Amino acid sequence: MKEYEPIYVTKPFLPPLEEFQEYLEHIWSTKQLTNKGTYHDMFEKKLAEYLDVKYVSLFSNGTLALISALQALRITGEVITTPFSFVATTHALHWNGIKPVFCDIDPVSYNLDPQKIEAAITPKTTAILPVHVYGNPCDIAKIQDIAGIYGLKVIYDACHAFGVTINGNSILNFGDLSVLSFHATKIFTTFEGGAIISHDEVTKKRIDFLKNFGFAGETTVVAPGINAKMNEFQAALGLLQLNYVDQSIEKRKKIAEYYRLNLSRLPGITCLEDVPGVRHNYAYFPILIDKEQYGKSRDELYDALKKNGIFSRRYFYPLISQFPTYKGLESAQPGNLPTAEEITQKVLCLPIYPDLELDRVMQVINQIRGHKHYTKKRGSLA
Ligand code: T4K
């Protein structure tokens, strides 16, 4: 019975299989599987057009793209970053031998709080690595101001921010570099995949050398690069996905609106609001649960939903700063990150993906409403 099928936090959108078949036949006939094939180059060009950015360098995944972005700009020493993200953000620093310096987040956007960045700068700081978490834009103007004053590079982890624009301008056009992920759980997927967005040809070239072992020609190696190339299968899927991504975002938007309509007035539940002038991509639908008012904690609701076949996720809990590799750092101490510590305890990401029907969304909403405590003192449920 449909009603009892589990609902996951996300499900990738895939184009009709027949359409992919044509691409597979081409790959089978040419035997070009990877290493800057036809689809790779076509996708790189088409993606840059779609995103309205100057240069795209395709990668096999977002993590290798992040690691390579830091290499490309020769970032060393210390980098200021957010603890409220997926672990890959900080791991990319670690893999480059860079010390992460955690800075607290803003209570409304959940992104790096620009007011707190300056206090984290030391003589060893070389860059800022903010994340547009849930695809919600960082305060790019303030971050750029600080970077300009202190001579720091800015690399945006834009893994959640595919297709997001501010006043019609792609969010990827800000900072020195931006990194995308096309993982299966992202709004735009190439199975696994990622990209670095750069703004000048020299940087783009260096990035392309780095993702191909540092090769600048058949016998010339200009840097200790890595193998992070996107293959032809991924690129072919990417080309097809470009035809569907706007439609996917529209469907996600409807689901987000439905959630907001039905949840935002529920005591103890806070929904993240749209920001004026921003085209959002609705990659995630996070809510905050206030135990005092809702009557149940985030974890109690998470468990209750799970028992009913609804697999929400606690993105991002625990904070990256709480993982063993990082928790000993001075900047990782909870007292330094009060807002992040609060949000990570309250946040829950609800299921959202293009094929999620509204009656299934209503099922999630009803569960959340149903688990609200009825207490005489607070009156009945809204
Ligand atoms: N920076 C940020 C800010 C990121 O969020 C990420 C990745 C990165 C960097 C690194 O980019 P990549 O190197 O991954 O390109 C997932 C993803 O593995 C990860 O890519 C993503 N962020 C992170 C936010 O979420 P999990 O452990 O939550 O995924 P998983 O496997 O539990 O999947 C969640 C649900 O999605 C499943 O319950 C069902 C559905 N699903 C998942 C997969 C993999 C499918 O229906 N099909 C699938 O193939 O980490």
Image (cartoon, rainbow, N blue to C red):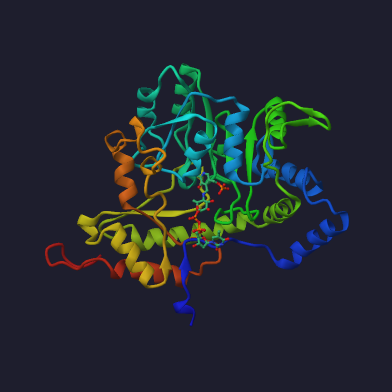
Q: Is residue 25 left or right of residue 99?
A: right
Residue drawn at (12%, 67%), measured in percent from left and top?
376
Count of marks placed on residues: 0
Q: Position of residue 85 (x, y in %)?
A: 44, 44
Residue drawn at (78%, 43%), measured in percent from left and top?
36
Q: Position of residue 368 (x, y in %)?
A: 33, 66
Q: Is residue 281 left or right of residue 305?
A: right
Residue 170 visible in rendering: no
Query: Where 371 falls versus 45 (above or below)?
Result: below
Q: Position of residue 51 (x, y in %)?
A: 64, 42
Residue toward you, 33 or 106:
33
Q: Is residue 334 left or right of residue 171?
A: left
Query: Residue most toward the bottom?
Result: 1
Q: Is residue 278 left or right of residue 243?
A: left
Q: Position of residue 32 (x, y in %)?
A: 83, 51
The quadrant in which residue 168 appears is top right
Residue toward you, 377 or 207:
207
Residue 222 visible in rendering: yes
Query: Residue most toward the left?
Result: 377
Query: Where 252 falls versus 206 (above or below)?
Result: below
Residue drawn at (49%, 79%), measured in percent from left and top?
2
Residue toward you, 197 or 75:
75
Residue drawn at (44%, 67%), measured in percent from left and top?
361
Query: Where 253 falls versus 173 (above or below)?
Result: below
